[in-house]
Amino acid sequence: MVTSITEPSEPLPKRRPTAAFLMAHPAHFIALGAGSGLSPKAPGTVGTLWAWLVFAVMAPWLSDSAWAVTIAISTLAGWWACTVTAKHMGVPDSGHIVWDEVVAFWLVLWLVTPASWVGQLIAFVLFRLFDAVKIGPMAWADQHFKGFGPRGGFGIMLDDFAAALCTLLVIAAWQFWAI
């Protein structure tokens, strides 16, 4: 078990995260979405659902500028946390690392607000589709930023931001053609 803040020079052997792993390092807690990434089935979907819930709780309290700052800080913290956690798990982009889904989906929800519950559900489905299928920009980001270290952590975050961008483009196109 990794219990110190210092980082190993090489990735550790592959491991599946547990509750003990989650609590062993602050980066693990962040990268695993406060435990939502521990789900044995569809951790990315569970992490995105957790992001939606947190957004719904926080939205009444945060202004647009506060959301912008929250997303920016969460992106930087996520880059660090995903980098550290991937190395500790021995997996360059484990599906259990869900902070990338969390922050990217917050971005989607923030930019589509005020959307109805159905509008948010459509955003959720589109985001999960683009994140899972990994075509176009998601595939490019996923292929070009693999590995351990800061480049790998950046890549973990980047492919979900690409999925967020594609989600927002589809929603914008739909709104444009619906008018």
Image (tube, grey):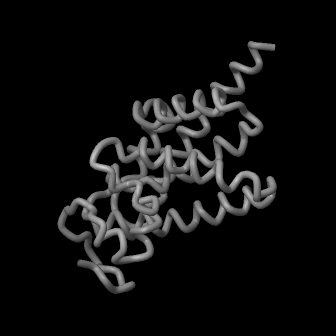
Residue 148, placed above or below residue 168: below
Question: Quick one: quadrant of the N terminus?
Answer: bottom left
Q: Quadrant of residue 178?
A: top right
> In the picture provided, is 107 more to the left or to the right than 40?
right
Percent x, y of residue 21:
30, 70
Which residue is rendered at x = 18% and y = 67% of the image?
13
Q: Residue at x 32, y 57 (%)?
A: 92
Residue 141: image x %, image y %? 46, 44
> Farthest top residue?
178
Placement of 47 over or under 178, stated as above or below: below
Q: Is residue 1 shown to the viewer in this render?
A: yes
Where's the C terminus, which quadrant?
Answer: top right
Q: Judge from the rendering whether residue 141 lies leftward or rightward of residue 176; answer left or right.
A: left
Q: Please provide percent x and percent y for residue 40.
A: 27, 48
Q: Is residue 151 among the parts visible in the rendering? A: no
Q: Quadrant of residue 84?
A: bottom left
Q: Residue at x 38, y 44 (%)?
A: 143
28 w.r.t. 43: above or below: below
**Which of the two residues, 103 or 23, is positioned nearer the viewer here?**
23
Quarter where residue 41 is shown = top left
Whole-percent x, y for residue 101 in the image: 50, 48
Q: Single out the residue that lies furthest toward the left.
A: 13
Q: Residue at x 80, y 53 (%)?
A: 64
Q: Nearer the viewer, residue 27 or 134?
A: 27
